[in-house]
Image (cartoon, helix red, strand yellow):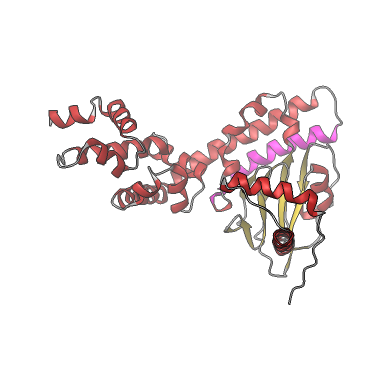
Amino acid sequence: MLRITSTLYPSTKVRPILQEIVISITGIRTIITDWDIRAIQTIMDVVSLKKIKENEMENVLMINSVGQFSALNNNETLHPLVNIVDLSKAGKKLNQKYNYGFYGVFLKEVKCGDLQYGCNYYDYEEGTLVFIGPGQVIGTENNGELYQPKGYALVFHPDLLRGTSLGRHMADYNFFSYEVHEALHLSESERKLIFDCCTKIRYELERGIDKHSKTLIVSNIELLLNYCVRFYERQFITRENVNKGILQKFEELLNDYFSSDKPKEIGLPAVAYCADQLNLSANYFGDLIKKETGKSAQEYIQLKTMDIAKEKIFDISKSVGEIAYELGFKYPQHFSRSFKQHVGYTPNEYRNLN
C-alpha cells in the first residue's frame, strides 16, 4: 500500500488561489475548504510520484552538449560545438535511450540490435545513415544485453550554425524529422563521399581553430547534407515499387476516409493523419508523395477532395451546405471558395452546367 504524506501550505495562502482557479474553469463562485486543499494536494503528490516513476522507467539519458557526447564515447572534444566521433572507441554499452540537444548524423557500420525511436523500431544494417535533431529520443531496446558500437557520428550544435547560410536553411533538410525506419541506405560509392566530407571536417578540427575554421566546417557539413538530399532522391527511385504501394494505400485511405463519418467528426483529412495511418513520418510521407506525383501531400488531398465534391454536386437532393459538411468543411463558404479555386466555378454554377 502506498502511503503519501502531504506537506500543506497554509490554507490562508492557498485557498484564494484555488478559488480563482475553480472560478476560471467553472465560472461558479465557490468556497474552498481545508479538506478540498488536502484532497487537491494529495492528487498533486500522486501525479508527481507517477511522473517520477515514469521517468525512471523510461530511463532517458539527457546529452545536451557535443562535449558530453564525445566524453561518453571516449573521444576527445576537438571543438565545443562540433565533432566527428569514432563510436568504436566507446566500450561495450548497455542498452539505453538518449535525448540529444544537438544534430547528429550517425553512420553505423555494424548491426547492433533493435534501435527504438519514438514508438518505432529499426534494425541497423551496415552502411546506414540515421539523422537526429535536437530534442529527439533515440536508443536501444532495454533487454539487458551489451553491445559494441561501431561507426562514426557527426554531431553539431545549433549554435554552430548561427549567422550562416546553413543555419537559415536547416529546416529544408526534412530527413532530420524522419523516423529511424526511414533511414538512408548507402551504396559503397556514396559511403566514400560521406567519409570524404567527414575527413575534411576532422582535418579542420585537428589543425586548430582560426578565423576560417567555422566557415570551412559548416560548408562541409552543408555539402554532406546536400549529398544526403541527392541520395534520398535516389532511394525514392530505387524503391519505386514500395513507393507506388504507399501511393496506392494513400489513395485507398482517402477513399475510405470520405466514405466514413470521419469528415463530419474530425474534418478534412490532414497530412499528419494520413502519414500516421501509413506508419510514416509526416516529412518523409510528404517528400515521397512529392517525388511520386509532383504535388505536395496537401495538394494531393485537396485535389482528391474536389474530385469527390464534383461527384457529390450531382446529388440535387442535397444542398451545397450539406455537401460541404459531408466533406469535412466547417463552413459552406470555405467549401465554395475552395471549389471555385480548383474547378473554376462555384458549386451551384458547376451543378447547373452539368
Q: Quadrant of the N terminus?
A: bottom right
Q: Quadrant of the C terminus?
A: top left
Residue 1 lies left or right of residue 80; in this view the side is left
Q: Examine the rendering and report whether any part of residue 239 can be seen.
A: no
Residue placed at 23% from the left, 25% from the top?
A: 345
Q: Is residue 113 left or right of residue 65?
A: left
Residue 244, image x, y percentages: 37, 48
**Outermost residue to the bottom:** 1
Q: Which residues are magenta?
A: 182-207
- Left-right relation of 341 to 35: left
On whether residue 193 falls in the magenta region, the answer is: yes
Which picture quadrant has residue 5?
bottom right
- Residue 329, given in percent of the width and then of the height, sits at 35, 39
Which secondary structure dominates the residues rendered in magenta?
A: helix
Circle count: 0
Residue name at image x 66 percent, y 64 percent: 141
Q: Residue 25: x, y in percent?
A: 59, 47
Is residue 212 positioned above or below 127 on the image? above
Above or below, 316 against 183 in this view is above
Depth order, front residue of 203/338: 338
In the displayed structure, would residue 223 be above or below residue 88?
above
**Is residue 318 toward the left or the right of residue 3 in the image?**
left
Rendered image quadrant of residue 105: top right
Between 179 and 220, the one nearer to me in the picture: 179
- On the question of residue 245 being in view, the answer is yes
Q: Is residue 232 magenta?
A: no
State the residue in front, 42 or 10. Answer: 10
Q: Where in the figure is residue 286, as x and y percent of width and height?
A: 46, 40
